Amino acid sequence: QCSDSAAQTGAFLVLGVAYVHGALDQQTTLTDGTGKIYTWDCENRLIQVTLQNATATTEIVRYYYDGISRCVKREHIIPTKTTTTTTYLYDGWNVIHEPATTVENNNQPRRQLHNHHNNSLH
């Protein structure tokens, strides 16, 4: 959990890359000039990547973590087309199972399963 003492507001530019840190949400955002916007939480975990073109957001990837900072869920959103949600199941720190569900524009789920024991996609 983040402390209030860690919350500082600021913006700075390093080698053409803009960084912004907000005090209210305790998140840091990086814009790299290629249309990708990276956002980290106050524990320095990547929580979102947004890809934008000149007119709209084209893709969003969100990451969710458990209490010991393991990524437990990933959402890959293509607005108005599909959302793919992957959940990660662990044995200690090793990912042992990562089922994925894709919901297309017609709201019909399509499941995929990746087995880490033989690296096959089912």
Image (cartoon, grey):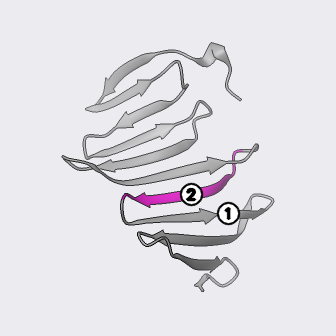
Residues at marks 1 and 2, CA–CA distance in whole angstroms: 8 Å
At horizontal 31% and vertical 40% (from top left) the residue drawn is 32
Q: Position of residue 53 (x, y in %)?
A: 23, 50
- Foreground residue, 8 or 87? 87
Amino acid at pointer 2 = Arg
Question: Against 104, is 117 above or below?
Answer: below
- Mark 1: give few (<14), some (14-19) or many (20+) Cα within 10 Å: some
Label 2 Cα neighbours within 10 Å, binned few <14 / some 14-19 / many ≥20: some
Residue 65 at what x, y percent from top left? 66, 47
At x 51%, y 71%, the residue is: 102
Left or right of 72? Residue 79 is left
Give the overall secondary structure of the magenta segment. strand
Residue for badge 2:
74
Q: Which residues are magenta?
A: 69-79
In the picture, the disc for residue 76 is: none
Q: Residue furthest right?
A: 92
Mark 1, residue position = 88
Residue 53 versus residue 95 in the image, above or below: above
| Three-letter code, disc 1 | Tyr
Q: Earlier in the sequence, mark 1 or mark 2?
A: 2
User: In what element is the residue under mark 2?
Assistant: strand
Q: Quadrant of the C terminus?
A: bottom right
* Residue 45 in the image, given as x and y percentages of width and height: 58, 41
- Image coordinates of residue 111 in percent, x first then y, are 58, 78
Q: Does the residue at mark 1 contact the one at mark 2 (Cβ under 8 Å)? A: yes
Q: How many marks?
A: 2
Q: Determine whether, in the image, residue 62 is placed left or right of residue 35.
A: right
The residue under the point 37% across, 20% down is 11
Residue at 52 percent across and 15 percent down: it is 8
